Image (spheres, rainbow, N blue to C red):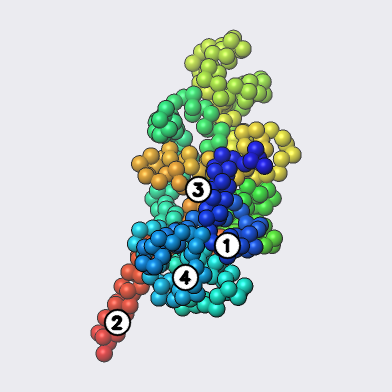
C-alpha cells in the first residue's frame, strides 16, 4: 500500500496512526466510525486539531495538567460550555490565521456532534458560537485598469520577454530578434486571451472550450456552457471584439508585395517555413540568388506577415474548431492558458510583488473589481462571471463606501440649501 503513496502521504499516514493510538477509546472510535471514507490529509488535520485541543485543555485546567491523552475523561466534553468554546477560539485567533482557526473550529464541532448523536454526551456548546469565517487569501490580489493596460499593450507589441535565473527568480528584458520571431506568432492570441479575461470575466474552462462558431460578433457575446450545463451568453465590448478579430484575421498582406513578385507563392511558402528563423534573409539569398537590400527587406516583411497572421500562423489542422490553439495547432489546455497569463503579467509588470500569483481567476476578479469601481452593477458582473455574487478587494469596498458617503453628503447639502 505504501508504495502507491507519496513520501508526504506515507509520513502523514504514520503520524496519523501514532496520534490516534494515543487518543482515548471514544475518540479513536470517532475516527474509525465517522471518517472511514475521508481523505488522508483531512484525517491527519483532524488528528492535529484534536491533539491541539487537548493540549489547550491541559494548559487551562489544572486537574488535566498531567493527564495523558489516552486517559482524557469524557466529562471534559460533557462540561465544555459555550463560554469555553468562545475562549478557545479567541486564544486561537491571537496567534493563527483565520483559515486555520476556522478549520480547528470545524474539527471540534464535528467531534462534539459525533459524541452528541451517539448519546455519549448531551451537551452541544456551539449553538450560540459564531463560526469564524475563513478568508480568501488572494481576494486582494488583483490588477487595476492601468496595470491591465500595460500588460495588454506589451503583449500586443511583444517588446519584452521573461528570463529565469539560476536561483529561480525571473527578470524581464528587452526582446531580442531571435525571441521576437518566436513570440510574434502567439502575440495576437495571447492578447485576445488576456482581453477576454480582463474585459468579460469569462472562466478559464469556458475560454478553452470556445469554438470559433461560439463567437457572435453582431450581438457581441460568447456562447458558453456554464457549470450547470446550460448555455449562456458572456458579453464583450468593442475592444475585445477588435482583439478577437485581430487574432482570427491577422495582419493584412501589403498589396505592393503581392504585385512585385510573379513567384510570390513560392517566396511566401519559403517565408512561412522559415518565418521564425533568425538567418532567414541569408537562406533566402541562397535560395533565390538575390542579396540586394530591397529583396531581403521584402523577405523580412513577408516573414513578419506570416508570424502575425494570428490564428492562421498557429493552425496545423484545417479542421480544428477550437478558438484558442497552441503552437501545435491543437486546443489549448488550462495549464497552457495559466502559463500565458502568468508569463505576460510577470514580463510587463516586473515590479509587481505578486506577479507569479496572477492567474486567470485573478484576472476574472480584476474584471469584477474594475467593473464595479467604474459604476457597473455588481449583479451584472456576477451574471457575466456565472457566479451568485462577486468578491471585491478591501480597497474597492472602501472606495465604494467613500463614494456612497460623498453622494449622501452632497444630497444633504443640496436639500439643506433648498430649505
Q: Work out whether mark 1 precedes mark 3 in sequence or the reverse, and give the earlier one.
A: 1
Circle 4 packing at 10 Å, graded few (<14), some (14-19), many (20+), is few
The residue carrying pointer 1 sits among few (fewer than 14), some (14 to 19) or many (20 or more) residues within 10 Å by Cα, namely: some
Q: Quadrant of the N terminus?
A: top right
Q: Which residue is mark 1?
A: 25
Residue 239 in sight in this render: no
Q: CA distance from mark 4 to mark 2?
A: 58 Å
Does residue 207 sit above or below 130 in this rendering?
Answer: above
Circle on res. 412: 2
Q: Compare marks 4 and 3 and give the one earlier in the sequence.
A: 4
CA–CA distance in space, label 3 to label 2: 43 Å
Residue 269, numbered circle: none
- From the image, tell me which residue sits under label 3: 359
CA gap, disc 4 and disc 3:
46 Å
Q: Secondary structure at mark 4?
A: helix
- The x, y position of residue 170, in whole percent, is 41, 34
Q: Residue at x 49, y 55 (%)?
A: 48
Q: Which residue is mark 4?
A: 76
Which label sits in the foreground, 3 or 2? 3
Amino acid at each position: 500500500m505504501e508504495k502507491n503513496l507519496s513520501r508526504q502521504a506515507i509520513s502523514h499516514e504514520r503520524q496519523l496512526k501514532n496520534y490516534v493510538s494515543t487518543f482515548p477509546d471514544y475518540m479513536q472510535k470517532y475516527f474509525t466510525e465517522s471518517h472511514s471514507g475521508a481523505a488522508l490529509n483531512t484525517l491527519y488535520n483532524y488528528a492535529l486539531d484534536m491533539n491541539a485541543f487537548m493540549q489547550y485543555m491541559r494548559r487551562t485546567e489544572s486537574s488535566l495538567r498531567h493527564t495523558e491523552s489516552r486517559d482524557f475523561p469524557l466529562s471534559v466534553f460533557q462540561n465544555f460550555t459555550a463560554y469555553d468554546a468562545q475562549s478557545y477560539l479567541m486564544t486561537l485567533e491571537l496567534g493563527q490565521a483565520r483559515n486555520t482557526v476556522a478549520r480547528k473550529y470545524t474539527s471540534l464541532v464535528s467531534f462534539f456532534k459525533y459524541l452528541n448523536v451517539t448519546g455519549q454526551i448531551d451537551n452541544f456548546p456551539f449553538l450560540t458560537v459564531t463560526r469564524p469565517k475563513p478568508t480568501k487569501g488572494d481576494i486582494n490580489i488583483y490588477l487595476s485598469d492601468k496595470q491591465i493596460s500595460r500588460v495588454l499593450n506589451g503583449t500586443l507589441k511583444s517588446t519584452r520577454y521573461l528570463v529565469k535565473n539560476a536561483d529561480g527568480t525571473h527578470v524581464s528584458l528587452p526582446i531580442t530578434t531571435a525571441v521576437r520571431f518566436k513570440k510574434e506568432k502567439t502575440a495576437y492570441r495571447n492578447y485576445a486571451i488576456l482581453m477576454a479575461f480582463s474585459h468579460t470575466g469569462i472562466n478559464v474552462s469556458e475560454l478553452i472550450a470556445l469554438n470559433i462558431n461560439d463567437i457572435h460578433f453582431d450581438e457581441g457575446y460568447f456562447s458558453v456552457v456554464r457549470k450547470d450545463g446550460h448555455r449562456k451568453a458572456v458579453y464583450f465590448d468593442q475592444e475585445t471584439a477588435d482583439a478577437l478579430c485581430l487574432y482570427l484575421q491577422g495582419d493584412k498582406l501589403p498589396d505592393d508585395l503581392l504585385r512585385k513578385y510573379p513567384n510570390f507563392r513560392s517566396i511566401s511558402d519559403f517565408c512561412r517555413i522559415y518565418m521564425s528563423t533568425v538567418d532567414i534573409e541569408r537562406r533566402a539569398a541562397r535560395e533565390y540568388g538575390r542579396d540586394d537590400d530591397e529583396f531581403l527587406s521584402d523577405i523580412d516583411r513577408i516573414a513578419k506577415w506570416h508570424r502575425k497572421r494570428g490564428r492562421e500562423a498557429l493552425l496545423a489542422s484545417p479542421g480544428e474548431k477550437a478558438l484558442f490553439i497552441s503552437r501545435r495547432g491543437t486546443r489549448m489546455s488550462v495549464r497552457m492558458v495559466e502559463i500565458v497569463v502568468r508569463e505576460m503579467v510577470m514580463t510587463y509588470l516586473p515590479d509587481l510583488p505578486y506577479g507569479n500569483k496572477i492567474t486567470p481567476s485573478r484576472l476574472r476578479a480584476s474584471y469584477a473589481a474594475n467593473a464595479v469601481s467604474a459604476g457597473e452593477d455588481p449583479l451584472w458582473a456576477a451574471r457575466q462571471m456565472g457566479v451568485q455574487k462577486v468578491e471585491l478587494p478591501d480597497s474597492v469596498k472602501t472606495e465604494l463606501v467613500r463614494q456612497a458617503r460623498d453622494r449622501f453628503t452632497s444630497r444633504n447639502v443640496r436639500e439643506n440649501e433648498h430649505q
